[in-house]
Amino acid sequence: MAHALSLHHRLSHADAPIGSERTARAIAQSEAVCRSKGARLTPIRRRVLEALHGVDGPLGAYDLVDLLGSQGRRMAPITIYRALDFLIEQDLVHRLASRNAYIASSGTVAGTRTTAFLICEGCGDVNEIASPDVAETVLKVLREQGYQPRTKVLEITGRCIRCQDVH
Ligand SMILES: [Zn+2]
């Protein structure tokens, strides 16, 4: 099973210290975003966000429970879900409905930006397309329809370039 393998791979990856420089920078930026909106990145929310930035790809809520539990005090799933809800509200994390998983936002620019994800059904790779053109076009169409979006994430599933022509 490609999915199980790649999840295991990513989780063992995450055993490496999650305090990498890139993660630290993302957390510092996220803290600034929260402060500017009068929201608070509590220790629990921070740990969840750190865990998501520490892996290369999406994690399910129970992956997060396991991952964070292995690093210290076990957190109840409801605690993780609440932290995820907050992080999604702040645009710091996106929920991938098709995978029932969560992924750290690559940009910490909060707002009405639409994010597109290319999700590979072969290797499970998730690639975020941060294109202002896509965001603008989607917003324009939504306005024309008088539609008020709740989610701002586009998910496109298919095969990445590495998984094409593989027999
Ligand atoms: Zn692939």
Image (cartoon, helix red, strand yellow):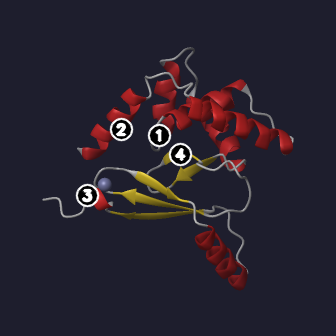
The amino acid on which the numbered mark 4 sits, given as a three-letter code, is Ile
Q: Position of residue 140 (x, y in %)?
A: 68, 80
Front-lying residue, 18 or 67: 18
Front-lying residue, 7 or 56: 56
The amino acid on which the numbered mark 2 sits, given as a three-letter code, is Leu
Quarter of the image for residue 28 reads top right
The answer for how far apart the CA atoms under marks 3 and 4 are is 21 Å
* Label 4 vs 1, first from the N-terminus: 1
Q: Which residue, given by chain and number where applicable, does mark 2 sit on?
A: 7
* Label 3 vs 4, first from the N-terminus: 4
Q: Which residue, given by chain and number where applicable, does mark 3 sit on?
A: 163
Pointers 2 and 4 in contact (CB under 8 A)?
A: no
Mark seen at residue 103: 4
The answer for how far apart the CA atoms under marks 2 and 1 are is 8 Å
Numbered disc 1: secondary structure: loop
Pointers 4 and 1 in contact (CB under 8 A)?
A: yes
Q: Position of residue 114 (x, y in %)?
A: 63, 64
Quick check: 15 above or below 167?
above
